[in-house]
Image (cartoon, grey):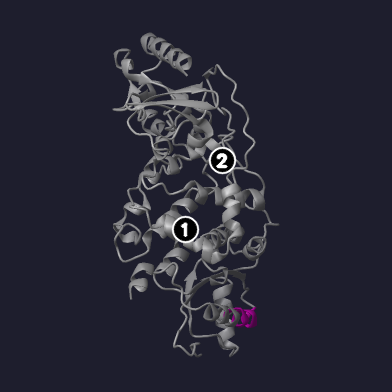
Amino acid sequence: MKEVESKMLERAKVLLESGEVARVIGWRKGAFCHDPEPASFESVDELKDFVYDYFCGANLSKYLIAESKKEGKTAVFLKPCDTYSFNQLVKEHRINREKIHVIAVECMAKLDIGKIKAKGLSAVTGVEVDGEQVKVQTLYGEAVLSKTEIVLAKCATCNKTHQVKDEEIVLHERPVRDVNRFAEVEALEQMTAEERFKFWREQLSKCIRCNACRNVCPACSCIKCVFDNPQSGVAAKANDDKFEEQLFHIIRAYHVAGRCTDCGECSRVCPQGIPLHLLNRKFIKDIDETYGEFQAGESAEGKTPLTEYRESDLEPKDVLKEGK
Amino acid sequence: MQEITTKEGFVPNIVAFCCNWCSYAGADLAGSSRLSYPANVKIIRVPCSCRVNPMFVLKAFQRGADGVIICGCHPGDCHYVTGNYYTRRRMAMLFSFLDYLGIERDRTRLEWVSAAEGAKFSAVMNDFVAKVTALGENKKLSDLRVKEGE
């Protein structure tokens, strides 16, 4: 990863110095080793804080909505999963493609600090990844963990490849994962309605309505959001007398149905650890099974499943019949 | 018209979204043909079944509906040519999603009722109200926490 980082840094310097781009969007060092944050670098000077490591899980594509409106070109580093969101945003005319220079960067799966902490490690000062083994350094010593146990939920089932690139910095081939991303959704479908309700009520009632999932979601790019409207009936604080979290999440999942690229940012940022990607994946699974396989963001053109129809489409009761 | 009430005194509240061109006229025909349907059904007239934003359905449940039914023209007969095809996809996805969250699937329904099908309208509503009555009160999507505290 260090090699990749230095190549990226080198390239960012060249682009900024030559004036080819006005800014580079990447990641900047945070207060700790495990919280790098998305940042815009406008000069070579600022690049001293540039970082790209195993904690750079953030999807940078949404930042381009604002950046592509600015003067001059913007260079951006996109991981494979981010390029789907990028395509989707271009399709929805949210990003001006001509003003963006996409540098595709390799991603060998990112780590989840929450999962590392859950292993009983605190005060993490750094990680060294060697294949499937992760050496975690802390103030209290070192520990070796298995990588599959501590990767982000969104990385655990990811086999995505770069869909857009103007150039690429890929030094290593990523092994293909043999995992079914719908396994968790299928497990839920096997439950009875009461069990499912109990599961979701437990999960969703943890929601503190911080709106992090909405704000990070690349598909949630409306300038005016229904949840900001106090008249919507779904915008009150969490301890209102309504069961609003459920409605909030149903509406949000439905709004991104057919456009969600399964980038998994919602679950990554949720401070309460709600598996929000399982809501979106249900829609993806239903759409795949009912209207044919569809991966949002594979192309920047064409219609999405919910904006087109076939005369032979199934009736809702027939779609449901197949379930439990 | 009479409301259906259970022995325990539960009066189901049903919201029916009916398209102006077919199902609303179908309801009218049911009335003028003296075919009855339960008074629990509250009809909301919409220009086309595709006017029904999935949020309308959710909001109806949130505000205390026990069942929501959407009625439109038969596929191919839409006054706006293609509206009901979109409704079909949208509602198929919404109903399946509500089922995934553990909401009883009999609380939601999509039916095609033409302006000439007064008898079908009456039959569909009678059947739907009977099913929702059997399910009982909608506790899952309405003001859940308040009701639990009671």
How would you classify the magenta stretch by its main secondary structure? helix
Amino acid type, residue under disc 1 in the picture: Trp
Name the spot of residue A202 as percent of width and height, x first.
Answer: 43, 58
- Report if residue A88 lies within the magenta region: no
Callout 2: chain = A
Instruction: Identify which residue is drawn at 57% across, 49% down.
Output: A184
Q: Disc 1 versus disc 2: distance between alpha carbons?
A: 25 Å
The vertical placement of B98 against B35, above or below, is: above
State the extent of the magenta-drawn residues as a range: B117-125
Q: Is residue A263 above or below residue B97?
A: above
Residue B5 falls left or right of residue A298: left
Which residue lies under the disc numbered 2? A296
- Residue at 46%, 42% (x, y): give it: A219
For the C terminus of chain B, the image quarter is: bottom left
Q: Position of residue A300 (x, y in %)?
A: 55, 34
Q: How dense is the environment of label 2, judged by Cα within 10 Å: few (below 14), some, or many (20 and up)?
A: many
The one of A99 and B40 positioned closer to us in this rendering: B40
Report the front residue among A183 and A16. Answer: A183
Which residue matches tag 1?
Answer: A200
Residue A174 showing in the rendered view: yes
Position in image of residue B65 (x %, y %): 44, 73
Left or right of B82, for residue A211: left
The structure residue drawn at horizontal position 52% and vertical position 61%, both measured from the top left corner, is A196
Secondary-structure class at tag 1: helix
The type of residue carrying mark 2 is Ala
Specify the subunit that label 1 lies on: A
Judged left or right of residue A160, residue A10 is left
Could you tell which of marks 1 and 2 lies nearer the N-terminus? 1
> Quick one: which residue is furthest to the right in this view?
A312
The question of residue B123 being in magenta is answered with yes
